[in-house]
Amino acid sequence: MSNLWDLSHIQPETRVVLEGDTVPAMFWNAVETRGPQVWMRQKELGLWRSWTWGRTAEAVREIAGGLMSLGFARGDCASILSNTVVEWVLADLAVLSCGGVANGIYPTDAASQVHYLCEDSRTTVLFVEDDEQLDKALEVRDRLPLLSKVVVFDMEGLRELDDPGVISLDELRARGRDYLARHPDELMQRVQACRPEDLAILVYTSGTTGKPKGAMHSHRGLVHTVRGYNTLVAQDARDERMCFLPLCHIAERLGGEYFALYTGAILNFVENPETIPENVREIAPTVFTAVPRVWEKFYSGVMIALKEASPLQQATYAWGIGVGTQIAERVLAGQPVDGFLKFKFTLARWLALNNVRKLIGIHRARFCVTGAAPISPELVRWYLALGVPMLEVWGMTESCGAATGVPATRIKPGSIGPAASYNEVKVDPATGEILVRGTNVFMGYLNQPEKTAETIDADGWLHTGDVGSMDEDGFLRITDRMKDIIITAGGKNVTPSELENELKFSPYITDAVVIGDKRPYLTVIVMIDQENVEKFAQDSDVPFSNYASLTRTPEVQELIQSEIDRVNKKFARVEQIKKFFLLETQLTAEDEELTPTMKLKRKLVQTKYSPQIEAMYR
């Protein structure tokens, strides 16, 4: 159990804890040293099943043998189209052990996107999760002449399938056993032939503008970064992580799979995206990385639960969080915490705050990490008041994930911290753009040398597209994306992300896009939190028949207006939001308006809802 006033238990680890200069070399070294220890757990039929390093190695060895039996050569690309499951990791490590290139495809992608990504990456073997993903592959297979085999993880509903181009993972493993019996040394020869400079993985950008671009990462970059992560947020084999973000995204691939591979931390896989809240409470991770939307959802769940609590429970929570806030303020200011306040905080945790932490599932967490999008500083303070340090990291696909990070011993809400020890970060004095340079910076975009040249300059600096500032302590603050800054008709520069983060702090608002470039005033498009707003409507006896009718009710309109009024008070008059529009469709990752990491695509939203936007300016 962590003490908020003593963060010495979260110390960065600078020594190399696992040898190997490529990902497969690290993996097979880990197997040798950790064989019987548990590395992964996955819930199947209501029970948590464990994967030791030895069992994982056996599966990886057989899948790799199966790939070699199919003629999979060094440098060939295999793609993985699946949700976040153990088999994703097994396939990834098998491909890399063969000297191949591993590429992830979002399970929410349409068949046309699967075609583009497989074609662009020259995929020869495609792993798919189940019948749903197989359908996409079969729809586009005829237009992918290089694709030789589709391998299915879960064959439920496909037992009668008779297609020479499709095999099950079990069948691939059986082929692998036969192949390795005849070629016992080939796999380790492939592993040893891998070089740090070789292309290891492709991570496609989400394509908010134009087609996705395949960011190329070498083994050297991956190993350099994953070792660097331990100097930011140290973990070890005693830690338990939750694996639930898409593994084709750089955050979970590096911060989840590869970081756990390096440190020996246990990876726990959730059942599916809908069971995350339940699984968090079961797993109770000691190190928890998530995107702001998850932290916002947990917070709003607590706020809604409080409204149903008894007056005594509400008063106890208010007192407890008040004490936690006093401690948090002293910690943030670098001031000592006296014995009496420590005693009060211990009592506050026993009476209220520990229950809140258990409700979320963070009662064992030494710290939480947030990244991939901006987070409200108030949310960071709230988690800190619960006694859980919330550390913000910043980076992007092209920087191999985190390039900066807030140290646990010096949290500054609203800051993304100083540059990580393994790269350089500076702010361009002319444009305010944040630039990154280091071994972690990607090799370039696959098949797009002109885009690469636009992104990495002659001196090796990665142009991130984020605008920010650096304080006297070297702590960076993101202002906004260069292309997102609003200049109103009156010439006022507005950073929409500040307003949007404040709005998303509301339990009733999931996402927001502020509009106002070259306009006389600011407006906002809001996506409501369906669960919490429906509960508000039911508690208030507001009639509605579906999601769209819910958004149109006067009571819900007034509810959102009150949330906007709350936010407006924090900003100057010229920065205040004058009108809003509620999206009348509940969006999911399958919808074009959302990125796979569940962020609204600003440009697309502005185009698609231009009639509604224009109506707010009439």
Image (cartoon, helix red, strand yellow):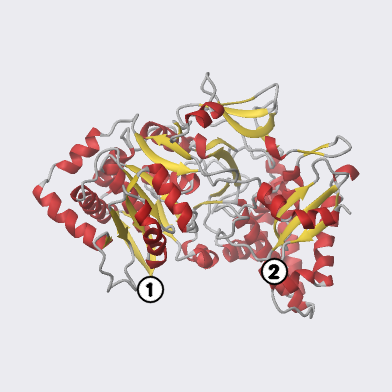
Residue 4 in the image: state x and y as whole percent.
Answer: 62, 48
Residue 253 image position (x, y, % from top left) = 44, 46
Q: Left or right: where does residue 205 sit relative to residue 344?
A: left
Q: Is residue 309 visible?
A: no
Q: Is residue 47 visible?
A: yes
Closer to the camera, 220 or 597?
597
- Is 402 in front, or is 515? 515
Relative horizontal placement of residue 371, taking residue 149 as reference (left or right): right
Which of disc 2 and disc 1 is earlier in sequence?
A: 1
Image point (71%, 43%), residue name: 330
- The quarter of the picture where residue 36 lies is bottom left
Q: Is residue 618 above or below residue 102?
A: below
Say which quadrant the C terminus sits in.
Answer: bottom right
Residue farthest toward the left in the current orientation of the protein: 182
Label 1 to label 2: alpha-carbon separation: 30 Å
Estimate the x, y position of residue 297 in percent, counting from the top left: 64, 60
Report which quarter residue 226 is drawn in. top left
Reply above or below: 427 against 170.
above
The amino acid marked with disc number 1 is: Leu
At numbered mark 1, what does the secondary structure look like: helix, strand or loop? loop
Query: Which residue in the structure is indicated by mark 1?
Result: 45
Q: Which residue is mark 2?
A: 532
Q: Position of residue 236 (x, y in %)?
A: 41, 45
Q: Name the secondary structure under disc 2.
A: helix
Tell me which residue sits at (52%, 19%) in the image. Answer: 458
**Residue 100: mark:** none
Give the residue displayed 87% in from the left and 50% down from the top: 569
The residue at the far top in this view is 459
Neighbor class of circle 1 (other Cα within 10 Å; few <14, some 14-19, many 20+) is few
Which amino acid, by three-letter code, is at mark 2? Asn
